[in-house]
Image (spheres, rainbow, N blue to C red):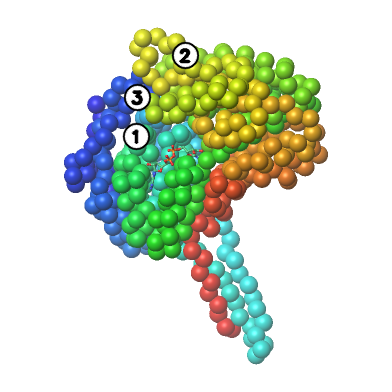
Amino acid sequence: MQQINHFIDGAFSPSDSGKRFDKRSPVDNTLIASIAEAGRTDVDRAVAAAKRALNGEWGGLTTEQRVDLLYGVADEITRRFDDFVEAEMADTGQPHHVMTHAFIPRGAANFKVFADVIKNVPAESFQMATPDGRGALNYALRVPKGVIGVISPWNAPFLLMTWKVGPALACGNTVVVKPSEETPLTTTLLGEVMNSVGIPKGVYNVVHGFGPDSAGEYLTQNLDVDAITFTGETRTGTAIMKAAAEGTRDVSFEMGGKNAGIVFADADFDAAVDGIFRSAFLNSGQVCLGTEKVYVERPIFERFVDALKQKAEAVKYGRPTDSDSNYGPLISREHQNKVLSYYQKAKDEGATIVTGGGIPDMPAELAEGNWIEPTIWTGLPETASVVKEEIFGPCCHIAPFDTEEEVIAKTNDNQYGLSTTIWTTNLSCAHRMAAKIDVGVTWVNSWFLRDLRTPFGGANQSGIGREGGVHSLEFYTEMRNVCIKL
Ligand code: NAD
């Protein structure tokens, strides 16, 4: 069994207290690793190392030198691609092709893209007139914010963690990362990469543990952490924001969603079915951008429900390494119980269960895993809990609609506002809808098609701030204006 330790000041170390916790495989719940659990002293040690590194060799590098090092990180991730794929599969239980096509390549891209952004971003400059006629020149310098606390979730661990670490380091900050307790492996492996490409000690640190009364909370409470970037549940964001109020520290939050998929009768039918299927069931529905409420224009409603049902019933459960499996388990027993409780609620609220609704029959060797059926409901009112609350599982409710106004109102009746996916061949309609739906990201005739230079984030309770491209620089740097009287 693997022993996973913290990565602090360039070295792997256990907790001062010797405390550890277990990591189990989502596939069969066998024990796969023992993880060091950080106490406050471990977290403080990591933050102190990150603070020292700001004033050491790292702080003295030019942008070009930093960019070269980050290209090196991306290349080394690619060189050790199979190690990352294996670690992420062990942590999440998700299929091999999800790792090789999305989760791991995106991790490498997060270092390259933000190195390019910082290298190419222009400086802001304004000339101004002065009464003596000689004028003045203003220009803005971008300086790193300092030590960034990165708190990340389990659903796409490497992709989501590097999405924060890439720009934070590109901007010259140092980081202390607290990965999810459910998925510690790839974040730890990245420590080896940092050392082998020569990232100075203390620039990238990792502490393991849980949220409240554990590593996550200790990290947010350390006042030498200058800003906190967080991805996870909205109620966790609320707790972190309270902690960040002490010392008035900046936050960037990417949080929950209850995202709608909207299919018009004029859509390319097969493409829409494929797109909604992916958006509802990829990663076993554990995607923040995933679709859990689908609205289909009435003339194609029944045909659409039937086509989605057929696809949902054709998923192939199995280990990530099985070449014909395309559908993995949920991350943990606890999450499986949460999603099953929503399956029960849907039943109690009178849903028509089109397919699924329970645990699939699995062969004996996988019977202890966190498996769950892809599930489709119809027939519920908009007020039903499975239509309103984020479930974060492989399930969706499908309802018919008749007018644009009606579907916009239903989509916007939402405490969240992360993303939406619209399927239509009528571009005027797509533009009208995109302007009126209250979310951070709208896809038309696609889903999860990501250009890392674009603004990403959520409206309402789905987030605070935008990251991506130059928008990340707004969070990871301080702008300093220099005014020179000529
Ligand atoms: P979570 O909020 O339970 O945990 C996320 C991280 O926060 C973990 O590392 C956890 O240990 C830590 N944490 C928990 N309580 C804390 C506290 N009090 N102080 C400091 N840290 C604390 O979320 P999760 O279950 O890991 O992830 C699923 C959630 O993440 C879903 O709601 C999903 O929508 C959201 N998500 C959002 C995005 C996005 O881009 N908007 C992306 C992925 C996931």
- Residue nearest the observer in this picture, 168 or 288: 288
267, 470: nearer the viewer: 267
Mark 1 crowdedness (10 Å alpha carbons): few <14, some 14-19, many ≥20: many
The correct choice, above or below, for 198 with respect to 92 in the image is below
Q: Is 58 in front, or is 312?
A: 312
Q: Position of residue 471 (x, y in %)?
A: 56, 53
The residues tagged by marks 1 and 2 sit, at their Cα atoms, a distance apart of 28 Å
What amino acid is at disc 3?
A: Ser
- Residue at the image point whose x is 26% and y is 34% from the top: 21
Residue placed under numbered mark 2 in the picture: 360
- Reading the chain from its start, which is encountered first: label 3 or label 2? 3
Residue closest to the eye, 11 or 396: 396
Q: Which residue is mark 1?
A: 185
Of the two numbered discs 3 and 1 in the rendering, the one whose residue sits closer to the viewer: 3
Q: Please give left or right for residue 274 compared with residue 150 in the image.
A: right
Q: Amino acid at mark 1?
A: Leu
- At horizontal 67% and vertical 15% (from top left) the residue drawn is 306
Viewer-nearest of discs 1 and 2:
2
- Contact (Cβ within 8 Å) of mark 1 with mark 2: no
Q: Residue at x 73, y 26 (%)?
A: 400
Task: Tell me whether the residue at label 3 lies in contact with that at label 1, contact meaning CB atoms closer than 8 angstroms.
Answer: no
Q: Judging from the image, what secondary structure is the residue with disc 1 in?
A: helix
Where 351 sits versus 201, above or below? above
Residue on which disc 3 sits: 25
Q: Position of residue 107 (x, y in %)?
A: 46, 38
245 lies left or right of 138: left
Q: Is residue 28 visible in this depiction of the protein?
A: yes
Find ligand 1 in the image and state its quadrant. Answer: top left
Asked whether, in this view, residue 281 is left or right of residue 398, the answer is left
